[in-house]
Each structure stands twice: as C-alpha cells, then as structure tokens.
Image: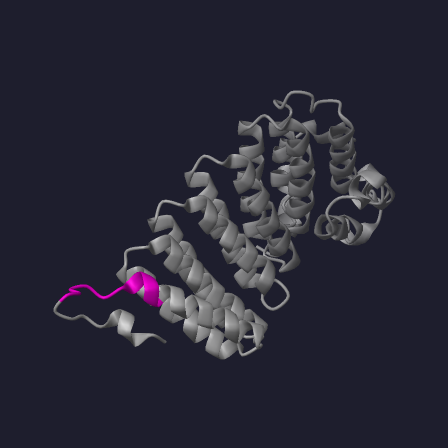
Amino acid sequence: FHENTLKTSMTKWKPDFDSAASEYAKAAVCFKNAKQFEQAKDAYLKEAEYHTENKALFHAAKAIEQAGMMMKDLKKMPEAIQYIEKASMIYVENGTPDTAAMALDRAGKLIEPVSLEKAVDLYQQAAGVFENEDRLRQSAELLGKASRLLVRLRRLDEAATALQKEKNMYKDIENYPTCFKKTTAQVLVHLHRNDFVAADKCVRESYSLPGYSGSEDCVAMETLLQGYDEQDEDQVHRVCNSALLKYMDNDYAKLAISLKVPGGGAKKKTAKPPQGGAGAPAASAEDDDDYEGGLC
C-alpha cells in the first residue's frame, strides 16, 4: 500500500500520514465491496492509525466506526460494539459529542436483538452525552428506549428510576402531555413492584403539572389505584384494558394487561371504606406491607 508515502529521505523529513490513510481507506472500500469484511476491518483500523498520527481524530473515529460496521457484517456483534464505543469516546474528546451520541444510539439498535442489557447501557451512555450538551429532548428519547428495555428485562427498580429522570426532562422542556404518559408508565411499574405507595406518590406529584388534574390520564390512574387498593379486580381490569393503556408502548401495555390485584383478586370492598381516588396516601401504607417487596 504505497509504503513509499511513509518513508523519509534527505528531502522529505516527515512521513505522509494523510496519503497513507487515504490509501488504506480506498483499500478498505475495495475489500468491503468484495465482501472481504475481515480485511476491510483491518484496512479501516490502519486508516485510523494514520489519521491518529496525523492528529485527525474525527477521521480516525470515523474509520474505527467503519471497522465496527465490518464486524457487524461478519455477525460479530460484541466486537462491532467495542469499535463503535471506542469511536464515540474519540468523538467526545474531539469536541463532536452529537456524533458520539448518534453512534452509541446506532450501536444500541444493532445490539438490541443480541443483548438487551448492552443496548440499555449504550442508550444510557448516549443519553448522558446529550444531557451534558443540554440537549434534553434527545436525551429523554434515549432514556425512554432504555426504560422500555429495562421493563422488558424485568429490572423494574431501575426502570422506575429511569422513568423518573425521563419525566423530569420532559417537565424541564415543558412537554407536559408526555409527562402524563410517563406518570402512567411509572404507576404500572410501581404496581408490578408491589409498591402502591410509590405509585400513588407519582400521581400526586403530577397534580402540579399543568393540565394533569382531571385529564383522561389522571382519571384513569386514580381509578386504577382505587381499584388496586380496594382489590377490585373488575375495576383494575377495566382500566388496564382501556384503549388509553392498550395503545401505550408495547412493553408498558404488557404490564397493564398482566397486572393483578393483591390478595388473589377477590373483591374486598367491605374491608375498608372507599379511598376516593389516588388522593389518600396514608391509609394504604400499612396495608401495603403485606405484599411489599415483590421484585425489589
């Protein structure tokens, strides 16, 4: 590969890293077109090496990311992700964090079918990069991807934390209707964690969001919490199978459909007077202890 470009002589004091990188880039494309992905990966890594020597870090990161894509074509996903993560770190160091976050997002999508755990990690990394740049909308969207996967993995404590962070970001950018949906997701997660108190608290805290009180989302959650607290299986079933919950993101819709009331679902309306919605926190605290713990 034109090793002459790297030789020095009496008249040429400095090797021509730029030309060397360019030659390896061309070679990589040839290998890629011939579907010789292993050789293409090696050529991209050599290209990155010479860009690094030349202090052209952005181009080095691009070449490393391309090496990762060659590993993807070879169905070697863990190696692919390693290269993309390495590239994203160089992007951040090079002052192009947006490119880093987008690369991590792409890596998350690639690895999702293979490892949900790794995808969560990548989406959270990407969200962190955007958050550092005060790009809250993009950060919240990526956190949303992580939250849904955490629910799918049944890592519900972490899902609850991620949802709260997501909701706070939407509140900061004044996207209140999305906050309402996040409250519903939080309630479902907390009830699956057998934590009625936390679910109730999420709704009560949302009363301060403009337009929440009396909204369709709010009324549904008050009705759900009342039914859950009074062990009224019919009421819980009615809310959980309503269009409002059924058409949520699939992972949350599944939580709704599979929600069971405590105590085996027998109606126990006589056990205590009706609570009148979600606004009665203290009365439920002691009763909760019987089935606290769940997945925590």
Answer with the quarter of the image where residue 179 lies.
Answer: top right
Residue at far front of view: 11
Figure disc tally: 0
- Seen at 52% across and 41% down, the residue is 139
Residue 251 falls inside the magenta stretch: no
- Seen at 54% across and 51% down, the residue is 158
- Counting from the top left corner in percent of width and height, residue 177 is at 68, 29
- Counting from the top left corner in percent of width and height, residue 191 is at 68, 46
**Overall secondary structure of the magenta stretch?**
loop
Q: Can residue 231 be seen in this snapshot? A: no
Q: Can residue 112 be seen in this snapshot? A: yes
Position of 173 relative to 90 (above/below): above
In front of the other: 214 or 74: 74
In front of the other: 127 or 92: 92
Left or right? Give the position of 17 relative to 273.
left
Residue at far left of view: 10
Q: Quadrant of the C terminus?
A: bottom right
Left or right? Give the position of 217 relative to 54.
right
- Seen at 40% across and 45% down, the residue is 96
Q: Quadrant of the N terminus?
A: bottom left
- Counting from the top left corner in percent of width and height, residue 266 is at 84, 49
Answer with the quarter of the image where residue 42 lies.
Answer: bottom left
- Counting from the top left corner in percent of width and height, residue 107 is at 54, 59
The magenta stretch is 11-20
